[in-house]
Image: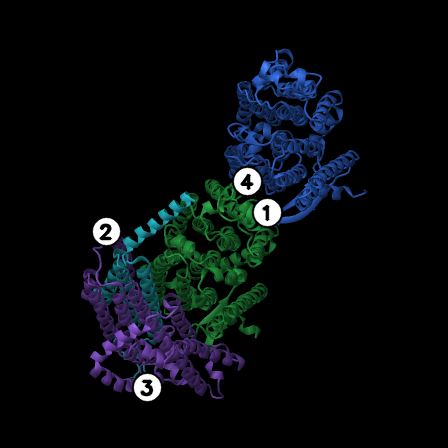
Amino acid sequence: MNLSLETLLQLCILLPIFSTIGIVALRRHQNLREAVSIFTSLFVFYSVVSIYLGLQTGETISVHWLQILPGLSVSFTVEPLGMIFALIASFLWLVTITYAIGYMRGHNEDNQTRFYCCFAIAIGAVMGVAFADNLLTLFIFYEVLTLSTYPLVTHAGTEAAKKGGRTYLGILLGTSIAFFLFAILGTWMIAGTLDFTQGGVFPVDVDTTLLGVILVLFIFGIGKAAIMPFHRWLPAAMVAPTPVSALLHAVAVVKAGVFTVMKVSVLIFGIDLLSILPTTQPLLYLAGATVLLASFIAMRQDNLKARLAYSTIGQLGYITIGALLASPIGVIGGSMHIAMHAFGKITLFFCAGAILVAAHKSKVSQLDGLGRRMPITMAAFFIASLGIIGIPPAGGTWSKWYLLMGSMDTEQWTILVILLISSLLNIAYLLPIPIRAFLYKESPANSALGVKEAPLACLIAIGITTLATMALFIYPAPLYELASSILQTTSIAHGQ
Amino acid sequence: MLVHLPILQVIVPLIAAPTCLILRKPKLVWLFTLLASSLAFVISILLLQQVMLTGTISYELGGWSPPWGIEYRIDKLNAFIALIISGVSTVVLLAAQTSIEKEIPQEKQTLFYILYLLSLTGMLGILTTGDAFNVFVFLEISSLSAYSLIALGKDRRALWASFQYLIMGTIGATFILIGIGLMYQMTGTLNMADLATRLPEVAETRTITTAYVFFIVGVCLKLALFPLHFWLPNAYTYAPSIVTAFFAATSTKVAAYLLIRFTFSIFGISFSFTTLPMETLFLILGISGIFIASTVAIYQDNIKHVFAYSSVAQVGYMIVGFSLTTHAGLTAMLLHMFNHALMKGALFLALAAVVYRVGSTRIADFQGLGRQMPLTMAAIVVGGLSLIGVPLTVGFVSKWYLVVAVIEKGWWWLAGLVLLGSLLAVIYVWRIVETAYFKAPIAGRQPVKEAPMAFLVPVWLLVSANVYFGIDTRLSVEIATAAAKSLFGVAQ
Amino acid sequence: MTMILGLYNYWIVIVLMMIGFYIIIAHGHLIKKIIGLNIFQTSVFIFYISVGKVEGATAPIWQEGILLYSNPLPHVLILTAIVVGIATTALGLALIVRIKEAYGSVDEDEIQSMDNQDVANQEKEHQQC
Amino acid sequence: MVGIALAVNQIKDMFAVVMLAGIYGLVSASFFVAMDAVDVAFTEASVGAGISTLLMLTTVAMTGRTEHEASHKPLLALLVVTVTGGLLIYGTFDMPYFGSADAPVHNHVAPRYIYDSMKEIGVPNMVTSVLASYRGFDTFGEVTVIFTAGIGVLALLSVVRRPKNDAAVEAINDSMHEKHLVLRVVIKTMIPFILLYAFYVQFHGDYGPGGGFQAGVIFAAAIIMYALLFGLSAARRVITQPVVQLLSALGVLIYGSVGFVSMLNGGSFLDYSVLSADPIAGQHLGILLIELGVGLTVASVMIIIFFSFSARSEYQQAKKGESL
């Protein structure tokens, strides 16, 4: 296949969306239907990689679709930050979909066709977000993402699921319309453009209080970043099937959130402006508070998935901090953490899912001694935890390191302390799980039912992500280069 | 014949009406009605093109030059709205025959179509005429036919709703009559353009103030502007579904047009907004309309009620745009008039399909329809999203322009309110989606089939219009802007 | 004083209008509402006609030698308006007849209460099913 | 008049109220005469006092006579009314005084009607010329309104299946008719004259007060009288429902086609002067035709309305009969 990179870029977004047609058409034949999904994901990953290689060779890739409002068009372009996001998303999606197939069949859930359709649309939307060239485009796909993931959350259709779905949609759609859109409009009125621009779009003479307010609107409006008090949707979404949670937490939704935060702070405000805004400091503390609180709550969760959910909220806080530190190193750390956390967290969720499938356990307190029966799973869980905490041999080490550096050179001592404390907290709520699994004595009840290791499909997925986590520790270089080039790259020509 | 387009716009459906009485056979009459309506649609398109190219057209009825004779005056504004109305009416008619078969007894169907044509005539007449009293006459044509159409509903409450509407409507019309009378008394003319030139001399008098107030109150009754909206919800709910779809998309637009026409073109901005504190009043009414009506909508059990109240809320949005008294604001209003017609047309037509299959629009009866009537429900979802104002739908475009206009005025708080208002929409739309998709079908009800093509085609025509004009906004925006500009041209 | 002489006529008309208006809103009996409507409108007609009156003029029917006529335009308008009026009345009355059949009453409150009753019943139904 | 209005407000017996309303109509008619509006007076008399009273009586007969104690919020109503009234009074203060010849009304548009209509249209009755020619389109609208009302009433009241025990109804009618034998004879002899008068009004409209509308009403009145005394079915035998409906449609169509013809003759819609070589003759012709259309529609719609009402009441009686 020798398609031009532009074509590939558009295909990343369109192909998944069109694949739904095939999925619906083939709803009667399971295997074919899944085949379509797999093929799509493979192709998306392929094209993203080739785009990445293209970017390495210094090409500028941008596509301009159509003008929705005068001076505002749907258009896409490739820049490092988006590249990182796209790479992670497309890769992990590939993994997730394989995992999902195993999982869904294992559980023989109904409405599977709807499930795969929404899955596909979601990833298309994510690609749209990743490559968006201006806020409007980003916003559009942001909403598409919300709407397409709603049916996934409510998949079970039970009262609980619907309630969860309501919270999910309510908060995400609500914040995005009430604050995010408002902030976008404000930006539009003040700056006259919504294109992502190196060094920000706002003219110098604008009153900083006003901009400060807009910044607040952005941070709260991007509900997907789960900054307290708008984090409730994340635990609520726990009712979803495990692959979905994985998608939400590692691949699509939350990452789209923090990614947007990054983009806004770097390419709309620009870190220089950001550092002088009156509201940056308070927001920074808010993010810090989110990190701490989330960790504390996580400790007190016995339900495994709930614990992981709160841990996610905490980790997202890290990335937001990275963005708001408004220092190059902070940005680098933050954007690296997007990747690191993605791999770590998705592994954890896969493990949780595997445990659920194989041993039908969902509570931490039930896991005693499970390590002997499910060694691979638990080992993976252990490594991934290290990744989240930020200890070798997992990639998390680096991102955390840069975040610390960032907070030092901006002399944010409070933040520094927060980061350190919360790392300890991470240890406190993650490591006990493998410890229980391996060292504790198995309760007779568990030994009674002969639990086996998880099905192969799951194990493969788990294996891949775990290896990736470690790989990122050993070769962080390419990721680091991308991250550090976020600030150097001059903005790509807009709106042609 | 091109010269005669302005009058043909109105005469075609008017003449078609009595002809139907001669044709008698319902099916035949339906086809004929459809023909007439689509003819009107074509004419309106031609007119709009002509106006966009050559500017305002004037047509002297009976060959008497205004102000002595009655003049038809087509400018960008009314050409635009005429387009909306004739277009929607045509699309809705596609489904009429099937829906009417179920909802109206055989021997009354012919009468139904006649009344439908007459109300179309009335609306178009109001739009195209350039003579104040002529407005009143055609207003009555449309109203009378509207009352009878609503009374044709199956439920006995239709009668009562219709009667209330009749009382309210007639009071409104009489108020308008008084307003016109006072204007005439002070200026000695009934021709709009002539009025516009002669009013300023007497603008300072208390009489003209009274005239304005009476006229506006009368119009607002027709517009169902909160708090004068009592008649609307029941009228929309118990009328035959097709009628609802038609009116919900059109009738408020006509009233809104009168509001704009008289405020901007005839009394002139300087009078309406400097002599009187109209904008503040309208702003308050608009905002409270948005919030109160939307909140009420959330607690309704009949989906038709839900959307009826949401219509009241939407009128609120238009009025907010209106009350800004800026070019941007007016553009937003016009744009929203266009978009809202598309949304509500699609939604109520989809409901008509539900009535056809399920025989009710109570939310309880929507359980499991998501699976049984996928296409119809999908249409409702898209329409709902458009109502909320999600990107890629027309709803988003309206919201965008409205908020931009508001911010341009520097009223950030108002911008916030407008956006918050749409959150309420999220709630009442999502109630429906949830029931339709995530509730098992009612036990004991035999499975419902998907609506017939006769519904799906027009519904999806409107739905795709919702999406198309949400993405490619050039056409609608261009016209709306031009119309708004021309109005301010008149005003200065 | 001249003002009173000059305007008393309008004032009477207004009083009439308002009585009619009052009958419409304040009375529960539907026929009475319609009658109120009639009175209301008729008085508006009178207003129009009085606007058209010229002191010492004759009816606007051309005759040799007469130069001062009252203004015909209001007459025309009101002719139309009367027709509209009767049309509305007829329709309203027809509605009343049907309402009487459907509800067995022509009193606003009774009908309203019955309406609410209907809603309640529907709710019951669907709780049953 | 204020007295009457107040009485209407007070009295609870519908029958009396309706009668008062009728009288109110008559009085206002005389008011109109006093203000030189002869045509209006004519119309108001035949409509306000005639038709509408008749209809109301029928309705009252069908719905019962008495009104319940108004258990309403008269205070609120009073408030609304006083506000509106107050505003109106406020509005009057800058009005030109009553009857003053220098009011703008008399000096802007009207003069042309008054002084030029004779040579432009050649019809002495200015009201007719304005009504039919200068503002001919309004009148077209008016006809449409009437037509709409007719259709609306039809849609509301038309009775599907003739009640089974038609005979019973017949019996009632006949028995009723036996009583008024004298009256019947008198009316029978009168009706032709009324019809004649109707035609006179129809065509004399150009010169004196009158015209299509009034003529139509009178014509209808004759038929209605006939129906009242000889029973609906008898009247139906004279004029059948479909025919009447057809005529009502025809009226509108005649009016419309006049407009179309003038279009085809190169004038604009309803421009009569192109109907014949000599504009004045054209105007005459046009006015004649459209007045005919008006007359047709008005008469037939009035008949339709009345028939529908009384048919409905018969239907109700029949139903009662069945239920008993």
For the residue marked with disc 1, what is the amino acid?
Leu
Q: Nearer the viewer, mark 1 or mark 4?
A: 1
Q: Determine the secondary structure under disc 1.
A: loop
Asked if labels 1 and 4 share a chain, the reply is no
Query: Do circles 3 and 2 both sit on a common chain?
Result: yes
Which label was assigned to residue D130?
none
Task: Name which residue type carries label 2.
Answer: Leu
Q: Which residue is mark 3?
A: D200
Amino acid at dot 3: Tyr
The chain letter of the blue chain reads A
Specify whether residue D103 is in view: no
Crowding at mark 4 (Cα within 10 Å: few <14, some 14-19, many 20+): many
Q: Residue furthest right?
A: A2
Give SS at disc 2.
helix
What's the residue at 30%, 50% (across, down)? C113
Residue A181's label in the rendered image is 4
* Residue at numbered disc 1: B392
Which chain is displayed in green in the rendered image? B
How many numbered tags mark residues here? 4
Position of residue A240 relative to residue B92, above or below, is above
The numbered dot on residue D75 is 2
Residue B156 location (% of width, % of height): 37, 57
Please state if B367 lies on the left or on the right of D105 as rendered.
right
Q: Which chain is purple?
A: D
Q: Are marks 4 and 2 on the same chain?
A: no
| Viewer-closest of B376 and A293 | B376
